[in-house]
Amino acid sequence: MTATPYGHLDDGTPVHRYRLAAGGISMDVLDYGGTIARLEVPDADGRARNVVLGHRDLAAYLRSTAYFGCLVGRYANRIAGGSFTLDGRTYRLETNEGANHLHGGSNGFDKRVWKVLEAAADRIVLEIVSPDGEGGYPGELTVRATYVVSDGEVRTDYVATTTAPTVVNLTNHTYFNLEGEDAPSAEGHYLKIDADFFTPTNAVQIPTDVSAVDGTPFDWREPARVGDRIRIPDPQILSGTGIDHNFVVRGEGLREHATLSAPGSGISLTILCDQPAVQCYTGNYLLGKLVGTSGRTYRQSAGIALETQHYPDSPNRPDFPSTVLRPGERFATSTIWRFAAGR
């Protein structure tokens, strides 16, 4: 595969774009942030549609705080107060969202150029090494992320190892609009999440407990129209200006986490993963200030992110599934996006 130049960082580091294609799917990946900048899948009429939000050039990605399509780490989502205690020692992290730490900080994995270890027609293997103490995290952390495109699927495999006890939570932050990136809204999509419980949050989006979804707007066990749910005046929706919550996925192992479908295009997406949760974010803070790939500005609910991961703030919550990784252990997880089309 030939890498296409995509610009340079301020320090002169080159950035490249790689195109993967197989089975009717075409995907553009940047080594900057491991970003999925474009993902084309066929609709019910056989026409290719780009179904992910993105920026038009590298300069826009460098300025952005929207995390379009990127790999997120060392710790995806939020850590309360920008600190955690591990083995009796407290570690201080950057507080880049008010008093909290978000998505690995302002120099997280989304803002780094990953090393390309392998690039082929249908796959790319990326690696990043985060030094001991970077961002306040202990241990030198080595992460490999592999994207593979096949017939109707995109698979992401993550592997991480560390030289000292640390915490890890990795995800991809792609926003989907299955009507097409240039469609004005994803509110007409139907969403289903295989979760009996979710984690309500306080005013700064930190989980407070684990609650049943029964009788709440967070019960997505049967498909529901996104635009209808985010208009319900529930205190949790009002606080987050929409859905920005962690859902506890039932079962274990590689299993279905969520499905998303768009009636207009006929495209549906099934997400499978082996992690305990998925964060659903309905693009609440897209306020018409970002210009997308097609030249259209993005507003609230222009896309929906479904981030397979661990719970937010797990390092401070012993009652949540552990995100601790120790030397000699191997963190490994896979996420599959399975696309189909029909009416």
Image (cartoon, rainbow, N blue to C red):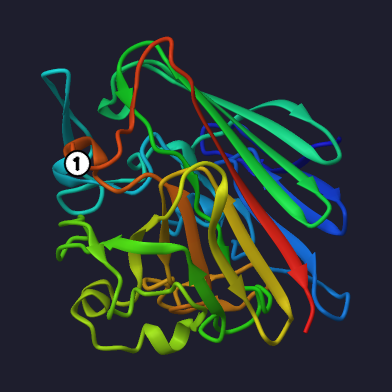
343 versus 40 height, above or below? below
Asked whether 65 or 302 is in front, the reply is: 302
Q: Residues within 10 Å of mark 1 (few under 14, many from 20)?
A: few
**Who's the residue at 86% across and 39% down the image?**
121
**Who's the residue at 20% across and 56% down the image?**
207
Q: Give the labeled residue for mark 1.
A: 319
Location of the C terminus by quadrant is: bottom right
Where residue 166 sits, quadrant-wise, is: top left
> What is the residue that sits farthest to the front in this orientation?
251
Residue type beneath disc 1? Asp
Give residue 249's position: percent from left, percent from top. 42, 55
Residue 8 visible, this orientation: yes
- Mark 1 lies on a secondary structure that is loop
Q: Report whether 45 appears left or right of 199.
A: right
Asked whether 120 or 161 is in front, the reply is: 161
**Who's the residue at 26% across and 66% down the image?**
212
